[in-house]
Amino acid sequence: MEFRLLGTVSVDTFTGPLPLGPAKRRSLLAALLLSANTPVSISRLTDSLWDDTPPLHARSVIQGHVSRLRALLVGADAEAYGVELVTLGDAYLLRLPETLLDSQRFEELLTLARGQRSPADAVLMLKEALSLWQGPALSGAFTGRPLQAAAHSLEESRLATVEQLAHAYAELGEHNRAAAVLRAEAVAHPMRESLAAALMTALYRAGRQSEALDWFHRTRRLLADELGIDPGHELADAYALILRGDPGPGTGRESGRNAAEGHGTATRGPLRTGGGSGSTAGSGAGPVPAARPAADRRTGPDDGTAAGPADRPSERPSDRPANTGNPGNGTGYVTSGSAGDVTGGAPSTAPSRPLPVPSLAGEPHPTDLLPRAPRGFQGRTAELAALSRAAAGEAPVCLVTGPAGVGKTALALQWAHRNQAAFPDGRLFADLRGFSDTGEPALIDVLREFLLALGVAPRRVPESVAAAAALFRSLTDRRRLLVVLDNARHSATVRPLLPGGTDCVTLVTSRHRLEGLIASDAARPVPLDVLEPPDSTALLAGVLGEDRVLAEPVAARRLAELCGGLPLALRVTAARLAGRPTWTLAGLADELADERSRLTFLDVDDTGVSAALRLTVQQLPQDAVHQLARLGHHPGSHFDPYTAAALAGTDPVVATAALERLAAAHLVTETGPGRWILHDLVRLYAHGMDPEGGPDALIGVLDHYIATALAAADTAEPGGEPCFVLPEDYHRPVAVRDFVDRSAAMHWLATERDDLALAAVAARTAGFHDRAWRIILLQWPQVVWRVRDSWSPLLELALDSARAHDDAYAESRVLNLLGWVLTEEGRTAEAVALLERSPVLARQAGDRLGEATALINLAVVQAEQGELDTALEDCGRAVELAREEQDAHTEMLALQHLARMQLTANRPHEALESARTALDLGPEHEEIARRVLLLTTSGEARLALGEEHDGIRLLDRAAEEAERTGYDEGAVRALQALLRVTAEPEYRKRYEQAVRRLTDNG
């Protein structure tokens, strides 16, 4: 159980968030959590729940909310977690372990971060602290004055933490990262001068002086325009620093270290080639720093010579005074005269260091264990540059991660071969076979190969992993060496193989994210994604020849798309075509287009996409394998933990854990917080993992969509009559998403529209017609909101499913909505043909409210065709049916349309009375769309009665409410009516803006 204040006020449990309900209940919970384990008085809770004068029954309201909250906690087994909500006289106390409260964990992490001596460790803790934030503090609650103050305090703490994180990055010399974390907050808080000053400094130290100056002038103008003040001392000092060209403190750890190395040490910094080949500073994909001068390297394992060219000075241990040299710099002792002439006796001024490792072998020679450079390598300019940046630090560990077949090894080898001159002491390579049928090699075997390559005599190689790893670190302490560790599965496998020298670069590739290596060794991840289309076709051309690709450019691009930009799939495809010169690219594209056989065509011998994915999947725990197999049956394009849980028959907590494991293995990709996708080829592979589980997975996700859409509709339009009863064999999900407010519900409906359509199509194809029409009909709040947004094809699919199920109830309900949409689209004749059947079907099904809705929609069409008398009669009958069923929602809808028809019939008095009656039926904050339309009708009725002032006032009010809530359709109607009676420029401007929004939104 977890309590959250840093974002939406919520309680997360094993089965998902508790349905806390209205904002005031969340406010109550927030007030109790802010004073956790301390009694909170009724008066303080009252201040938190009401801004102005509280109602007379405030105490009763609070008691009701406490009772409901206590029931929710008891139902979630809160006592097992040490959580209890108790009454203490005139106060309430929420007891809980502080570790369950995100704001307390945030403060604890900040305290730990402040105590870290290492900036890298501080960065990790500060990032973890900020990851606890899921949005503005206390979201979803009604924030009275005490809660407003608390939210402001929490936000101030968050911003201070962002500034601390940027400072820690600056201490590490990672000024671009500092600028990145500061920019987002500086944009959101443009008048917070400390943020602007810190961002300017970070940009300047990252070499982006013009951006830094531009930010200063933007902030200065904003302060002058908005507040009429000049920049404070922080901004002014940052500006002065940039103008002086002063590097200031913390401009990079490398610069300070190099200064201490003294004469004869190569400067670290921008990447440069060795051997006088010229500088490539600023080239992101360029070589790593040049080697130090020959006399500046650690002695070799036997006679004291370094493992490098034979012309280095001879430096035997016997020539060296005791306790001289410094492992942190390059001058262990003073050299003068010709090469090899070492002056003994006088120790250097550098701190002492341990004596070198005793001789173990004869003089070694530089070694190169790298496989050959990959052939036909294409693109990856940004990733090569990222590797070069990652390799420029101190003893860097660069971590290339990505899914199977994405080209991790190819990228690592390409970078290594391009930067050969930067590693004169050797390049080591080991395939750790972390995702292989043959199993991983023993670590002692890998270390033995490395030690032998470094010149250690076979008899001197230690037998234990710990001793061999220690010797490897000692031998590499003063060398400039590249170590490539390919196909690592675990962080623990990599750590013993890390070299000891600060000038060594380690390059690790893995299908897993290896977050443990990031935490323990500050590994710098370089994620690898699929190729862009131009690079994909270039890879095909590299194997097939440009002429063959240029002859069929459209087919080549289609092949690239069908391979999903995955280099392994592209190479297999190219191999098939290269061996069959008579085949056309278009012909193979047609073969690949069939999803049932695509993976078969992407396998050649023992190499291919299926084989690569199988090796990844076989390393996963069973729960993750089960989740992946069920994801293969998902009809949509993306999924969240609720959707994944419904597919797998689990709960969101278990599903989230499985998704994290799959993401760590790069089998799913998180595109946003809680939003995941599958690569097309992974989806096809997953679909074949458990074909028998397809029907269960589909039913689970369909019923999940029904449950979630019902919750969204109930939140978006509370009080509305459900548009159907649930299917008899409906499977309620373990947990259903809790929508905080109407905006969240409407956002979900809009975001999920495409996947809901795909789910409906899949339901119809599988014969689940009772689910298909329900999933479509549940989107009615969004249909009403965006009525001209091409809903008719989807509703026609729903109608086909309702008829296929021979369900008069369903057919009537779908006809109601489809007929109304067709009417709004101007397709009146089609609408009439459908709507005339709907009341009859509703009566057959005994659906009186459905009959009322059908009569309303039919009356609307009749009115448009000039049959006003018939329309008024049908609409009046609908009002009677709704009143008999005591359904205020449907009665309000019928009165809304009746008022519009009465106005059209030149009966403004009756129209005004109908609109008033309708408005009295619904609370002001609900039914926004309907309220706007009723206000518009009332305003037009007032104008028709000659009451121009009141008419304009009501129309303006309707337009304002529509604009404020995003109901552009209603804004256009109200403003159109206003422009018929007034030429006010402001109304014209607002009308044009509303029309533009409607057009832009489809």
Image (spheres, grey):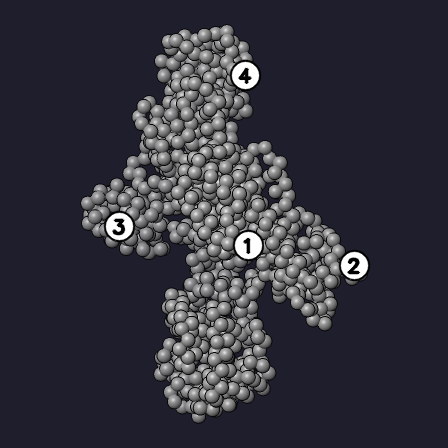
The amino acid on which the numbered mark 4 sits, given as a three-letter code, is Ser
In 3D space, how far apart are the residues under numbered discs 1 and 2 (Cα atoms)?
A: 33 Å
Few, some or many residues within 10 Å of mark 2 (<14, 14–19, 20+): few
The amino acid on which the numbered mark 3 sits, given as a three-letter code, is Ala
**Mark toward the viewer: 2 or 3:** 2
On the picture, is 624 further left or further right than 147? left
Question: Mark 3 highlights which residue?
Answer: 556
Few, some or many residues within 10 Å of mark 4 (<14, 14–19, 20+): some
On the picture, is 777 further left or further right than 718? left
**First in sequence: mark 1 vs mark 4:** 1
Q: Residue furthest right?
A: 89
**First in sequence: mark 1 vs mark 3:** 1
Q: Mark number for residue 352?
A: 4
In 3D space, how far apart are the residues under numbered discs 1 and 3 (Cα atoms)?
A: 44 Å
Few, some or many residues within 10 Å of mark 3 (<14, 14–19, 20+): many
SS under mark 1: loop
Question: Mark 1 highlights which residue?
Answer: 135
SS under mark 3: helix
**First in sequence: mark 2 vs mark 3:** 2
Residue 391 image position (x, y, % from top left) = 42, 32
In 3D space, how far apart are the residues under numbered discs 3 and 4 (Cα atoms)?
A: 63 Å
